[in-house]
Image (cartoon, grey):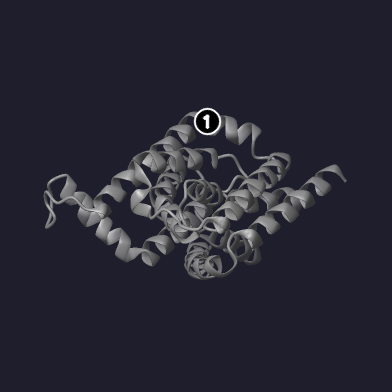
Amino acid sequence: MSTLEIIILALLQGLTEFLPISSSAHLILPSQIFGWQDQGLAFDVAVHVGTLLAVIMYFRKEVGAMAVAWLGTVGVGPEKGKQSFDGKLAWWILFATIPAGLFGLLGKDFIEEHLRSALVIAATTLLFGFLLGFADIKAGKRATHKPMEKLGFKGAMLIGLAQAIALIPGTSRSGITMTIGLMLGLSRASSARFSFLLSIPAITMAGSYLTLKLVLSAEGVDWFAMGLGSLIAFVSAYACIHYFLILLEKLGMMPFVIYRLILGVGLFWYILA
């Protein structure tokens, strides 16, 4: 890959991993539209590491509190035997990650062979964009919102099932999990925060799988591309999370809904032209 391709693809990964517009779609499309070569496993690992470090660093206080509280629920550490919401939230996130792991394990080959096309991306971009818009409008009209503490195990698992669907390119992991969060009564900010925290084990699983594939393959490693890609993905993802949460409070989801609708229509026009 050229340096320009590294920069563009790493920026796309960092900026779209946490926005409700589908990172997989934006990483697949350049190769299909511009004829770029596949970025390779090593680069995929690098940008996943960058985005994972960004979300952990941004939510380091929450992650630290959840880790300590979770250890306490299994009888380890300073909060041994204590029951707190942080410990409960950690369990919700761990269990809610299972559907995506199972779906990815069982369906990865089918997805790779049949669903990584511009046509599928165009359809899912529009469909789940409409759903996000519907959920955001309903949330905006709601007088009060359910606090995250009231989400419950069942609600967390529903969001986890939605995350599994996001393995289909164009769906957007953050988009569909925020959509379900809004439909369950959470505020925009709470939906986004739960989605971001849920992304940590999801990105970890995806990165671990790609790392295993890289280790087992004979693919060469471009250390410059990996280093630059990881750094750019980290910086852009961290900034994206920060400014997205600010924008969300002021404008809601509609700017991203409109973007998805324009992108979906544009893709259909490109495919059918």
Say which of 155 and 90 sits in front: 155
Q: How many marks?
A: 1
Say which of 198 and 203 sits in front: 198
Q: Residue at x 18, y 50 (%)?
A: 83
Whether residue 208 sits left or right of residue 41 in the image: it is left
Q: Secondary structure at mark 1?
A: helix
Q: Residue at x 38, y 38 (%)?
A: 154
The image quadrant that residue 119 belongs to is top right
Q: Residue furthest right?
A: 273
> In this picture, is 131 found above or below 187?
above
Residue 69 percent coordinates (x, y): 21, 54
Is residue 35 at least partly visible in the picture? no
Whether residue 82 sits left or right of residue 44 in the image: it is left
Is residue 210 at least partly visible in the picture? yes
> In this picture, is 249 found above or below 77?
below
Whether residue 28 sits left or right of residue 68 in the image: it is right
Residue 157 percent coordinates (x, y): 40, 39
Kind of residue at disc 1: Gly
- The crowd level at tag 1 (other Cα within 10 Å; few <14, some 14-19, many 20+) is few
Q: Quadrant of the N terminus?
A: bottom right
The image quadrant that residue 86 belongs to is bottom left
Residue 191 percent coordinates (x, y): 46, 54
Residue 151 percent coordinates (x, y): 38, 47
Mark 1 lies on residue: 107
